Image (cartoon, grey):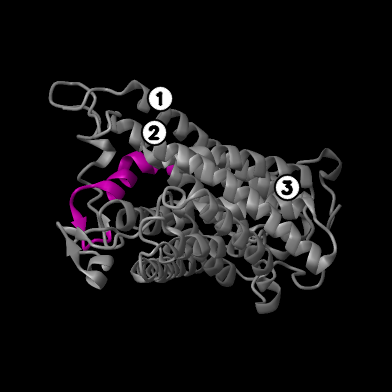
């Protein structure tokens, strides 16, 4: 039996706390990007997500994600470890430890924070028009039917892992009982960002456009909030990426450096693209570049060199800056650019690690197989998340309904849904924007 490693345990508890901080950080980021009359609702969607997922994750979320009894490689039996049964204590009453000497319950804490932030990311696509109660129901259903299965498929030994029964093994065979070319998703390119980005697009299409979309710009009401949120996300992301080494070692250090370098490069990529297109380097662009870089490096943080991280970040910053304009071209109302940043950034990181991975990437002599595997798992993630989200989204639309009334949307969703205003001078007032 492994001995308790207090250093690794302390690191993982710290990492879990850093990742949990990311959801309030997201509330600031999204809240600042929202309109004055919608900021509280936007922030409440993040806080509400923490409440819902924080309850269901220890009950069945962890078991569905990492339980031993896999159902078709899609999800694990939620009843095997319901309420973390058998996952906390050993027969002698001592805390169970993982292979690195960290209590298993600490791993549960770490993974719970991933589930929370992933669901919260989706909310930015449906700002200004969605019922809060419908969002809470969606959060629980989507986590159960989309996030937990995706976590199992990728990280829990399921269909998108290196399992001998998985997709990668089907493509290129097995070696010693595992896929010869294992998929790479260090901290959540497929599980978190592609998954959430596709869900955001599906909901934006199902719920429909905001009143006045396309008639004028919906401007962020508080850029300092956006900057603060981006800074806190960057800080929390060290737990997200470096914590995914699962101990305090060199892999964690590499992930830390790569996370910093990719994010810095993405800022430059975004604001330089802005300068070329519009003549200005904006604070909103810099903050968005932060998130784009963080998203892109997430799946690759432990597999690329700092140069590879810089390339990934720069590409993500420039491409995501262009991608946020797609909603205008194609007419879908992704309110806060979840699709342009998280779906596109997640795809960039997930696919391009097939080029930049130092062990198996095409640019390092590894051939094309890793790239093929990365594309394949990204496509499966897109299809799975899209189908599941559509089913849940249409079911809620047909029962509870998604949208507040046009009058409430015009008056302000903060007042309509929460009976509050972020700014006292707007209480009881009808205002399009400040």
The label nearer to you, 1 versus 3, is 1
On the question of residue 334 being in view, the answer is: no
Q: Which residue is mark 3?
A: 32
| Residue 69 screen position, x and y as percent | 18, 52
- Front position in the image: 275 or 61: 275
- Front position in the image: 110 or 180: 180
Q: Residue furthest front?
A: 365
Which residue: 84% across, 59% down?
A: 280
Q: Quadrant of the N terminus?
A: top left
| Residue 409 screen position, x and y as percent | 72, 60
On the question of residue 163 being in view, the answer is: yes
Mark 1 or 2, nearer chain start: 1
In the figure, 71 relative to 259: above or below?
Answer: below
Mark 1 or 3, nearer chain start: 1
Cα distance in 3D space between marks 1 and 3: 33 Å
Q: Which mark is residue 85?
A: none
Q: Which residue is mark 1?
A: 10
| Residue 365 screen position, x and y as percent | 38, 65
Is 67 covered by the magenta stretch? yes
SS of the residue at dot 1?
helix
Q: Which mark is residue 249?
A: 2
Q: Main secondary structure of the magenta part?
A: helix
Which region of the structure is painted magenta?
52-74
Which residue: 19% across, 34% down?
A: 86
């Amino acid at each position: 039996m492994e001995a308790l490693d207090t250093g690794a345990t302390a690191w993982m508890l710290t990492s879990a706390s850093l990742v949990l901080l990311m959801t309030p950080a997201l509330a600031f980021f999204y809240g600042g990007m929202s309109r004055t009359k919608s900021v509280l609702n936007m922030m409440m969607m993040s806080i509400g997500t923490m409440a819902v997922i924080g309850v269901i994750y220890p009950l069945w979320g962890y078991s569905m994600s990492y339980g031993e009894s896999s159902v078709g490689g899609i999800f694990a039996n939620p009843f095997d470890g319901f309420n973390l049964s058998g996952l906390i204590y050993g027969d002698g009453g001592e805390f169970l430890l993982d292979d690195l000497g960290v209590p298993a319950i600490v791993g549960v804490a770490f993974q719970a924070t991933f589930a929370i932030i992933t669901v919260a990311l989706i909310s930015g696509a449906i700002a200004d028009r969605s019922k809060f109660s419908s969002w809470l129901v969606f959060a629980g259903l989507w986590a159960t039917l989309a996030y937990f299965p995706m976590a199992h498929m990728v990280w829990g030994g399921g269909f998108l892992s290196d399992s001998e029964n998985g997709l990668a093994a089907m493509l290129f065979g097995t070696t010693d009982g595992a896929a010869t070319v294992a998929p790479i998703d260090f901290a959540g390119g497929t599980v978190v960002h592609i998954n959430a980005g596709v869900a955001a697009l599906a909901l934006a299409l199902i719920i429909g456009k905001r009143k006045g979309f396309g008639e004028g710009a919906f401007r962020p009401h508080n850029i300092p909030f956006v900057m603060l949120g981006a800074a806190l996300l960057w800080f929390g992301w060290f737990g997200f990426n470096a914590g995914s080494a699962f101990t305090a070692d060199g892999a964690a250090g590499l992930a830390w450096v790569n996370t910093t370098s990719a994010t810095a490069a993405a800022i430059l990529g975004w604001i330089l693209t802005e300068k070329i297109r519009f003549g200005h380097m904006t604070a909103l662009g810099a903050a968005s570049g932060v998130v784009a870089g963080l998203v892109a490096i997430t799946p690759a943080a432990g597999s690329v060199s700092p140069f590879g991280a810089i390339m990934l970040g720069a590409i993500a910053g420039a491409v995501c800056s262009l991608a946020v304009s797609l909603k205008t071209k194609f007419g879908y109302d992704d309110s806060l650019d979840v699709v342009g940043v998280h779906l596109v950034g997640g795809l960039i990181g997930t696919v391009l690690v097939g080029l930049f991975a130092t062990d198996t990437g095409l640019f390092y002599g590894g051939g094309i197989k890793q790239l093929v595997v990365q594309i394949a798992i990204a496509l499966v993630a897109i299809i799975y998340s899209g189908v599941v989200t559509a089913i849940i989204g249409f079911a809620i639309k047909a029962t509870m309904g998604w949208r507040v009334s046009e009058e409430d949307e015009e008056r302000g969703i903060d007042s309509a849904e929460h009976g509050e205003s972020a700014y006292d001078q707007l209480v009881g007032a009808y205002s399009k924007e400040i």
